Amino acid sequence: MELKYWAPFSGGDGDFMKELVTKFNSSHEDIQVEILNLKAEEYYTKLQTSIVSNQAPDIAIAHASKLSELTEGGLIHEIGDVAKEAGIDWSTYSENILNATVLDGKNYAVPLDTHALILYANETLVQEAGLVGAEGKLELEGGQEGFMKTLQDLKGKLPEGVFPVAATSNGDSPLRIWWTLYSQMNGKLLSDDAKTAAFNNEQGKQALVYMNQMVNEDLWPKNTKNGGEIFTANKGALMFNGGWMTGSMEQNENLKFIALPIPQLFDRKATWGDSHTFVLPIQKSQDAAKQAAALKFADWVASNAGVWAQAGHVPSKPAVVNSDEFKALKYRSDYVEIADYVSYMPNSPKITAVQDIFKKHLNVMMNGQATPEETLERAEKEINELLAK
């Protein structure tokens, strides 16, 4: 049985996934998978077009954040019954990660990982600043005031031209940082029925004020186009970025770094995250045997995701996380706990548009052209207009 499999992976991600497909094919004579990697920026458009034109692949990758959009459009299958046929045991998956793939009590995807926001530290710079303990662990003061004090102390100790925080200051990065801080205060993005914005409140404001303070005190420089480049050039002490940076950064011989979860600054541990998941696209004529084979492949990849973890992602199965293969990888075990409390944005078919609006207004604030209060009010108004349509 031959299965067509589409994915949006490039670079190291693409190489690791191809390796997994090759291993699956060599160990399964009855099922052979052919992978097609598409450019990420074109991926969802091409996937949707293929489904509408009855040329869809048998299995495809979709982000957990896209599932509501895909189900609303009638583009992917509910997979509960097929998963049983394929022998999938949902109890072998991280409950928190799995929950992000369940909509209205129904399973729509097999989760492969979580890729979430974590904190990186330049080991050389923070050591020189006295922030590394005897065991080589980063020692940060606790809570919102403690972390801010750490940044302020760093500013006074770092060489000229080196920043306490290296993080991209427009687009996805500020939104993910805000969502992390807001989630630590149990904040909600949308109302329970997803028909109105629910973030223009004291917690939403407090998270933005915290970010604004970093920018205003020049702890996190304005107009930072690529925080990753600054950090890898040894010009940033700390960096907020995705765990997916780990795989590429450890190849950099000129960079010594530490990776760990975002500290708990507010009421609880939380961090922004998303997941790569496997979905079954709608096809003109459904082949039940092919669907079961596709989910067997998905479950096999999730069960053998030690290879995938090399990219920096946290696998969705605790058994993989507890394996010797995973533990042998440097850095990953230092932030693997995020799987238990990664905070996903709510399921809504309009979530991409909601995020785009929020990012637009957040960019203005990050450039010093709007207050936190103005940012929340403008974003709330525009998002409510969108959700009312």
Image: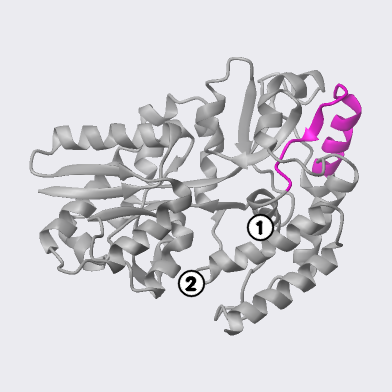
Quadrant of the rendered image containing residue 36: top left
Magenta run includes residue 154? yes
Q: What number is the disc on residue 179?
A: 1
The picture quadrant where one finds residue 53 is bottom left
Residue type at mark 2: give it. Pro
Q: Position of residue 184 (x, y in %)?
A: 68, 57
Report the side of 166 relative to 292 (left or right). right
Say if 370 sits above or below 296 in the image: below
Q: Which mark is residue 326?
A: none
Is 201 placed left or right of 120 in the picture?
Answer: right
Q: Is residue 201 left or right of residue 119?
A: right
Q: Measuring 30% from the left and 37% from the top, which residue is drawn there?
A: 304
Quarter of the figure with the C terminus: bottom right
The single residue placed furthest to the top in the displayed view is 253
Q: Earlier in the sequence, mark 2 or mark 1?
A: 1
- Stretch of the chain drawn in magenta: 146-169
The structure residue drawn at horizontal position 81% and vertical position 32%, both measured from the top left corner, is 163
Q: Secondary structure at mark 1?
A: helix
Query: Disc 2, disc 1: CB below 8 Å?
Result: no
What residue sits 63% from the left and 41% below the top?
A: 241
Measured as percent of width and height from the top left, residue 228 is found at 65, 34
Classify mark 2: helix, strand or loop.
loop
Task: Look at mark 2 in the image and give the residue it sits on.
Answer: 349
